[in-house]
Image (cartoon, rainbow, N blue to C red):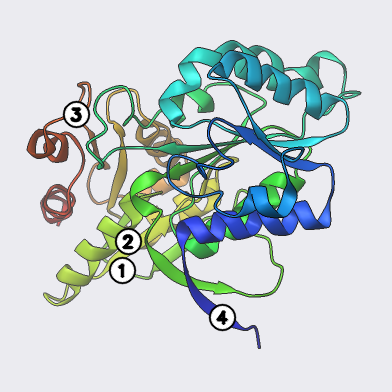
């Protein structure tokens, strides 16, 4: 039986990187302040001491430059992990991501691989205001050639990051920053989690919540509360958005006949619309007893004021209200 330990989400991310760097000397980490400062959230603590400055590479404050360097390193045989200090900074280096990393394998007829991981803290809830609190996964998801991963637990974070590092294609790995200090059970031995496989975090029969990232914990909180009233809520964690486990989405919709889709990102134009269309474009549509509901962020920049910031995102109360409306 596997030895399990309770560790934090950020420790799980660090373990995955360290273990892969020990296993494969082509893996290295690069980004701003990741060495002595250990990154904005302390994720790379101790890594400079173990691996040295040749594999823990401190970059200048130029995301365009070091993202491009990561692409170049990947196509010449290395496996870079490129850390963006905040996911919002993708805007600075979007050309390198969408026109270079995502397209090279296709443009060179499969003769070039780009085995790089773009790791970045995502989302709000920390008072970091409008330019450091966004959930921008939909901008990556619209680009063919990118895989997009949003783990919700330490177990998923470690297993999915190992899979990402071993993948021969570019992977965007979004770590919602409010999860960094959450704790969970993680095996001591090596393991990976395949992409494109959702995880049912809680079985239920009355209504399904389909979600990912930080919203998984909120959804479970709502499910546990409603369970006391005899309302059985199923919580499905997508884990990877591209590739998407469409079969799991359709199966849970057929099972409970009522669906709420929840994500922290702005609701308008968000990934929730893709989940809804996956359901209504399948035979699951004929099983539904009510229209699919969405709960997402407000269509506004993220406020600095903590009370306003909290209101801009989904909350347990908003998720609960959506569930009750369906019932």
Instruction: Say which quadrant the N terminus sits in.
Output: bottom right
Residue situated in front as seen by the camera: 108 or 287: 108
Q: CA distance from mark 2 to mark 1?
A: 5 Å
Q: Residue at x 76, y 51 (%)?
A: 21
Q: Where's residue 83, x and y in %?
A: 57, 34
First reached walking from the N terminus: tag 2 or tag 3: 2
The answer to whether 178 appears left or right of 141 in the picture is left
- Tell me the residue that label 4 is attached to: 4
User: In the image, which is nearer the foreground, mark 4 or mark 2?
Assistant: 4
Marks 2,1: beta carbons within 8 A:
yes
**Above/below status of 39 relative to 208:** above
The residue at 52%/60% (across/down) is 11
Q: Earlier in the sequence, mark 1 or mark 3?
A: 1
Mark positioned earlier in the residue sequence (3 or 4): 4
* Label 4 crowd (10 A; few <14 / some 14-19 / many >=20): few
Where residue 244 sits in the image (x, y, percent)? Answer: 55, 43
Which circle, 1 or 3, is nearer the viewer? Answer: 3
Q: Residue at x 16, y 69 (%)?
A: 226
Q: Secondary structure at mark 4?
A: strand
Of the image marks 4 and 2, the number of the one nearer the N terminus: 4
Please name the residue that numbered disc 2 is placed on: 256
> Farthest left residue?
307
Residue picked out by circle 3: 298
Question: Measuring 19% from the left and 74% from the top, which residue is drawn there?
Answer: 227
Residue 205: assigned label: 1
Q: Is residue 320 visible?
A: yes
In three-dimensional space, the C-alpha distance between marks 1 and 3, rounded to whole angstroms, equals 29 Å
Q: Is residue 290 left or right of residue 53?
A: left
Question: Label 1: how many residues lie within 10 Å, few (<14), some (14-19) or many (20+)?
Answer: some
């Amino acid at each position: 039986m596997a030895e399990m330990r309770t560790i934090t989400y950020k420790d799980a991310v660090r373990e995955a990187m360290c273990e892969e760097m020990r296993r494969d000397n082509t893996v290295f980490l690069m980004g701003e302040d990741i060495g002595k400062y250990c990154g904005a959230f302390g994720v790379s603590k101790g890594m400079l001491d173990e691996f040295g400055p040749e594999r823990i590479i401190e970059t200048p404050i130029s995301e365009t430059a070091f993202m491009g360097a990561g692409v170049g390193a990947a196509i010449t045989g290395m496996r870079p992990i490129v850390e963006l200090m905040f996911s919002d900074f993708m805007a600075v280096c979007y050309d390198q991501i969408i026109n270079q990393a995502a397209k090279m394998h296709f443009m060179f007829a499969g003769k070039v691989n780009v085995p790089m991981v773009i790791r970045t803290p995502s989302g709000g809830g920390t008072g970091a205001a409008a330019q450091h609190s966004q959930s921008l996964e939909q901008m990556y998801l619209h680009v063919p050639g990118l895989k997009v991963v949003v783990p919700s637990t330490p177990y998923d974070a470690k297993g999915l990051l190992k899979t990402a590092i071993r993948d021969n294609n570019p992977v965007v790995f979004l770590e919602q920053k409010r999860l960094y200090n959450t704790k969970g059970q993680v095996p001591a031995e090596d393991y990976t989690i395949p992409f494109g496989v959702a995880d049912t975090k809680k079985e239920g029969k009355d209504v399904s919540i389909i979600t990912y990232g930080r919203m998984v914990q909120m959804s479970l909180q709502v499910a546990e509360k409603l369970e006391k009233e005899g309302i059985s809520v199923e919580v499905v964690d997508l884990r990877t958005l591209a590739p998407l486990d469409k079969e799991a989405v359709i199966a849970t919709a057929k099972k409970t006949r009522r669906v709420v889709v929840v994500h922290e990102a702005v609701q308008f134009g968000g990934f929730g619309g893709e989940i809804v269309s996956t359901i209504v474009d399948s035979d699951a549509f004929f099983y539904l007893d009510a229209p699919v509901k969405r709960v997402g962020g407000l269509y506004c920049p993220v406020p600095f004021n903590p009370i306003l910031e909290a209101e801009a995102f989904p909350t347990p109360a908003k998720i609960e209200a959506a569930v009750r409306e369906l019932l």
